[in-house]
Amino acid sequence: MVTTYKEAGVNIEEGYKSVSLIKEYARKTLTSNVLSGLGSFGAFVELPEGYKKPVLISGTDGVGTKLDVAFRREIYDTIGIDCVAMCVNDILCHGAKPLFFLDYIACGKLEAEVAADIVKGISNGCIESECSLVGGETAEMPGFYKEGEYDVAGFAVGVIEKEEIIDGSKIKEGDILIGLHSSGLHSNGYSLARKIFENLDEKIGDKSAGELLLTPTRIYVKPILELLKSIKINGMAHITGGGFIENIPRMFGNRNFTAVINKASYNIPILFKEIIKRGVSEEHMYNTFNMGIGFVIAIDKEQKENAMKILKELGENPVELGYIKTGGEGICLE
């Protein structure tokens, strides 16, 4: 007969060890706006000073089947960065400055060091996006998840002045689209990519498939918020699941525009070229992957040169990706 929680598969002592390790990473992210300590039932975060009509913008996401690559390679810290990036890049599309982040980790059998590695990555992602890791949940669920497997999801909240919200309402014909490079597949399309690259040790260029597939998602918070200090941005899109075809038109709302994309405006990275070589159609590629561009902004054409200059000064290699025209096709790849 099972008479203890441990006999049922939940190790409370391992949970205590995990919390102890995790707290050190979380403390590194806390800003002066966080009023509560770690370990309370809820986190207290006050809004930064200076806002007249602050609006909170939230987003949630997970890492998806990229986790399977992490399990197979036994590398866990990069997926924490992915989790933060997928959330903060989304709320950034509306101009929001990230304030705080919470994570959720579920597993079949808790290993404190693995959980700590995941949170180490989450902490690094929060530091990169200048937001606080204020709490989270680690759920040990024996019999529900396999041992050695984890699920990771997160939730981000940001703030913006109400009159500064970017919702695409100012996009117009003739606006220029600027793309910022991705670091790889980011965290989308892995159900397909894992079928294509079953051998994680095979070489793709000068790196293994496993290395390329585990490259963490880029966080665009710093360059975009810095650009917003000088440039009026009319719309932004985070290129996630659905690729160019689904995500770029999202910045239009319900308005009838087409994003005309010049496919020759940049060099497609080797990983995407390799997927094409193995039989995936071009249309499917642009509807699944980011194709080397992880974030797209729409600006007035008169601001193009200044925007490109600022982004280069910030260490970016911006791409003039295309332009906006009237008409409801959504996207046109040329």
Image (spheres, rainbow, N blue to C red):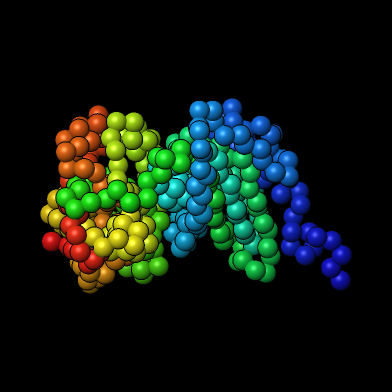
Which residue is painted at 59% across and 31% down in the image? Answer: 33
Q: Nearer the viewer, residue 51 or 192?
A: 51
Q: Is residue 324 above or below residue 308?
A: below
Horizontal side of 210 relative to 274 (left or right) equals right
Residue under the point 59% across and 27% down = 32
174 on left or right of 95: left
Asked which quadrant contains residue 246, the reply is bottom left
In-front residue for pair 117/49: 49
Q: Quadrant of residue 18?
A: top right
| Residue 181: percent from left, percent from top | 27, 46
Report whether residue 88 is seen.
yes
Q: Quadrant of residue 9?
A: bottom right
Give x and y (percent) for residue 292: 26, 52
On the question of residue 82 being in view, the answer is no
Q: Is residue 114 left or right of residue 188?
A: right
The image quadrant where one finds the C terminus is: bottom left
Q: Could you say where residue 278 lies in the image, as x and y percent from the top left?
A: 23, 69
Q: Residue 39 versus residue 333: which sits nearer the camera?
A: 333
- Left or right: 49 with respect to 42? left
Name the residue located 37 percent from the left edge and 42 percent from the top edge: 220
Q: Quadrant of the N terminus?
A: bottom right
Give me the residue at 40% from left, 67% from top.
191
Q: Position of residue 6 (x, y in %)?
A: 78, 59
> Exactly how many numbered labels are in the figure?
0
